[in-house]
Image (spheres, rainbow, N blue to C red):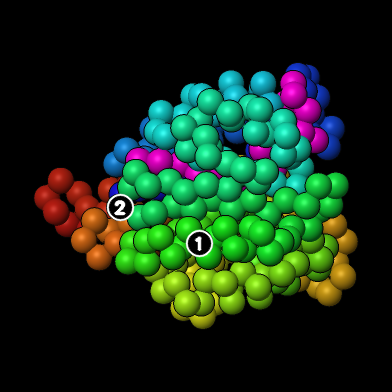
């Protein structure tokens, strides 16, 4: 199984440049085109929040124009730049989200790995939090299928990454999430957004990754209390390869721009080109 991940598209109303600098919709559509062209075919795509810039209905309309171009089934969760009500209205027709309660969380049962989307949003706040109700929902869902390898996907990462201005707005109760999933050994991976950088680590034997920037990247500044800045790193996306037999999850980063195509290592006679 090939699972794509797009994140933090920050779609704005027509004609507005993000931070006065770039058209986030153009960049998002380029990433979608690249994922559509990926071989082998992507089986599904998770889209991990900050889908719009400030959560306006018009932004969701433009977002939907983009997402409907994805050829594989796609599954969105909200981020702090989204508005949950408008998010749920925009995606009310998606069968995966039909059982959402007051939160935009749901399970996807169609693939060898079970996907569970989490809603980490706290209205009006940049940070994320999973209240007791949402943690109980997750525990209940994990109890339903203890033997199926499972990946959680969400916006706010439950870890600190060393970029101070992002760490103060991560999932504030990440430890509670890890406590919740600890008895559920089928949870293999957490896929997040929010930091606009490709980041990977492992917590208690569970893989944790953050998808890279499809548009602007948060600056790689590990100085304590470094300023909040972004930089225009090459646009990228994440792809997970889930082995058909072992179901091991491996994560990769691909780049959106055409960088000259593939060059062979070997000539037509099978000799290494030196
Ligand atoms: Fe973002």
In the rendered image, residue 71, in percent from the top left (x then y), is placed at: 41, 28
In the rendered image, residue 137, in percent from the top left (x then y), is placed at: 57, 58
Mark 2 Cα-neighbour bin, 10 Å: few <14, some 14–19, many ≥20: some
- The residue depicted at 47 percent of the width and 77 percent of the height is 183
According to the image, label 2 marks what residue?
112
Tell me, yes or no, if residue 101 can be seen here.
yes
Q: Is residue 136 left or right of residue 20?
A: left
According to the image, label 1 marks what residue?
140
Q: Is residue 94 left or right of residue 42?
A: right
- Name which of mark 2 and mark 1 comes first in the sequence: 2
Can residue 57 be found in the magenta stretch?
Answer: yes
Q: Is residue 274 left or right of residue 156?
A: left
Give me the C-alpha separation between circle 2 and circle 1: 20 Å
- The residue depicted at 78 percent of the width and 19 percent of the height is 15
Query: In the image as oriented, which residue stretches furthest toward the bottom?
Result: 204
For label 1, the SS is: helix
Query: In the image as oriented, which residue stretches furthest toward the left?
Result: 269
In the rendered image, residue 216, in percent from the top left (x then y), is placed at: 70, 44
Tell me, yes or no, if residue 24 can be seen here.
no
Extent of the magenta region: 43-59
In the rendered image, residue 93, in percent from the top left (x then y), is placed at: 53, 25
Label 1 within 8 A of ligand 1 by Cβ: no
Position above or below: 72 against 263: above
Mark 1 Cα-neighbour bin, 10 Å: few <14, some 14–19, many ≥20: few
């Amino acid at each position: 199984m090939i699972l794509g991940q797009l994140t933090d598209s920050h779609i704005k109303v027509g004609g507005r440049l993000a931070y006065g600098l770039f058209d986030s919709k153009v960049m998002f559509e380029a990433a979608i085109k690249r994922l559509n062209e990926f071989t082998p075919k992507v089986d599904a795509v998770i889209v991990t929040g900050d889908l719009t810039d400030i959560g306006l209905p018009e932004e969701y309309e433009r977002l939907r124009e983009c997402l409907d171009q994805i050829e594989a089934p796609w599954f969105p969760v909200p981020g702090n730049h989204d508005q949950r009500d408008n998010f749920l209205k925009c995606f009310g027709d998606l069968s995966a989200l039909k059982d959402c309660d007051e939160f935009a969380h749901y399970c996807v049962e169609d693939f060898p790995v079970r996907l569970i989307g989490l809603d980490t949003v706290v209205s009006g706040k940049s940070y994320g939090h999973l209240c007791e109700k949402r943690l109980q929902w997750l525990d209940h869902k994990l109890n339903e299928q203890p033997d199926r390898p499972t990946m959680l996907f969400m916006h706010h990462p439950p870890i600190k990454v060393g970029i101070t201005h992002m760490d103060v707005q991560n999932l504030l109760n990440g430890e509670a999430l890890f406590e919740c999933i600890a008895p559920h050994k089928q949870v293999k991976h957490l896929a997040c957004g929010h930091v606009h950088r490709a980041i990977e680590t492992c917590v208690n034997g569970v893989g944790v990754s953050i998808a890279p920037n499809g548009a602007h990247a948060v600056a790689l500044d590990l100085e304590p209390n470094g300023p909040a800045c972004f930089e225009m790193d090459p646009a990228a996306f994440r792809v997970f390869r889930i082995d058909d037999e072992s179901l091991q999850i491996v994560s990769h980063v691909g780049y959106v721009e055409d960088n000259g195509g593939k060059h062979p290592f070997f000539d037509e006679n099978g000799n290494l080109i030196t």
